[in-house]
Amino acid sequence: MLPTVQLADEIAGRVIASDDPDYDDARAVFLGTFDRRPQLIVQAADAADVARVVAVARETGLELAVRGGGHSYAGHGVSEGGIVLDLSRLRALEIDPGRRTAWAGGGLTTGAYTAAAAEHGLATPFGDTGSVGVAGITLAGGVGYLVRKHGLGIDNLLAAEVVTADGELVRTDAETHPDLFWAIRGGGGNFGVMTRLQLRLHELPAIVGGTLVLPATPGVIASFAAAADAAPEALSAIVHVMAAPPLPFLAPEHHGRPVVMATLAYAGAVADGERALAPFRALATPLADMVRPMPYPDLFPPGPEGMRPRAALRTAFAGGIDDAAAAAMLEHLRAASAPMAAAQIRVLGGAMARVPADATAFAHRDSRIMVNVVAMYQRAEEQPVHEAWVAGLAAGLAADGTGAYAGFLGDEGEARVRAAYPGATWDRLTAVKARYDPDNLFRLNQNIPPA
């Protein structure tokens, strides 16, 4: 048993044990799929607290879960019987508008960061959900609404402060510990706890963006993906092919019918954005068109309070979406029984593709499309049905096993982790792991064992 009182006396943050009235709230992560009961939850107040908790995990051998936003699809933000190191109090943000850089705490969310940066007319590319932790999404890569214009999140990481497995606080950048800097840009939480990140900011006073909904046919789906691939790099698109939910901006007769629900973001002048968006509006008569000039943070609305869905997910990369793949999406969607089931298409290329494949631990620079298949549901007993549906559609798209994005992997085994880090990337990561975490203390992640 851990000396809870002693640890509480040694740190500036808070220690929460199972008898604490806040325990159940503190152990909860975004996905309700995971109902684990850690021995302790430590809400660290600073890097010294982080180092102390890492030392306790090392000394006791207890499993260590490191949590920022808690969005891991594998539930890595909470441990069964171990220690949760909760970074949510590390929310400091220092923005230097003149240099266009920011230092962000490892527990800051992307939504809070984006809103603060927008006050200066600036932005950093992350993902598409405001409640995700800045550190977690950056460690995985960061594929979001600015990926074609400004690259991945990791392409805008300038430096980081990391507590390594031996409890040392290390600053890493391109010149200092460059092997560690290479590995944390895409290698996940395998190498330490990121307490602060220095990020590049880009001018972005506003965007032309929002939701465009079209009726889904194989031709519309394939043409939409092709148009997004051919669009100017200032335009990025995240597309969901799904049964239309009962949203207020959709007429009731469309509810439950297959639609292409796209979120578009054009990072440039309004007139140029309208021209870039015209081909999408011409594919079919829109069922809803809410694309307009807007502040960038408007793409990150707060999620429903207390929402903890269960989810089945598969992720892969593809060269494109043709009519056959689009038809497979629609065929499987007709058979879906989950309250929310979708095939998601993220169109890549642009700035992301111009970074050499070996420059970071994200090795899929030449991939044109990321395809994610997801089913969200509420009842635990339904899991096998929805997992089978997701796996079936992924196989139908011929996408299963053709690479993976670590940020969207569930608990899928070593082969899928290796698909995220193919070839020489894996070998180099295992060597860095052996140097910074030879005993695999940081193992509750998409794990890369030490060489």
Image: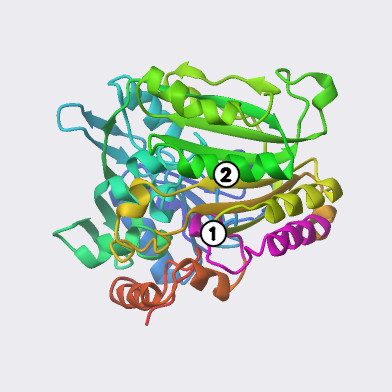
Type of the residue with mark 2 = Ala
Residue 69 in the image: state x and y as whole percent.
Answer: 49, 43
Pointer 1 local density, CA inside 10 Å: few below 14, some 14–19, many at least 20: many
Q: Is 297 above or below relative to 143?
A: above
Residue 409 in the image: state x and y as whole percent.
Answer: 57, 59
- Residue at 32% of width from left, 19% of height from top? 119
State whether residue 135 appears in this view. Answer: yes
Q: Is 400 part of what is drawn in magenta?
A: yes
Type of the residue with mark 1 = Phe
Look at the image and give the residue range highlighted in magenta. Answer: 385-411
Q: Is 441 above or below relative to 138?
A: below
Residue 400 in the image: state x and y as whole percent.
Answer: 63, 65
Q: Is 198 part of what is drawn in magenta?
A: no
In the picture of the structure, the residue carrying the numbered disc 1 is 317
User: Circle 1 — which element?
Assistant: strand
Residue 337 in the image: state x and y as whole percent.
Answer: 85, 47
Closer to the N terminus: mark 2 or mark 1? 2
Q: Is 58 above or below relative to 137?
A: below
**Residue 144: numbered disc:** none
Q: Nearer the viewer, mark 2 or mark 1?
A: 2
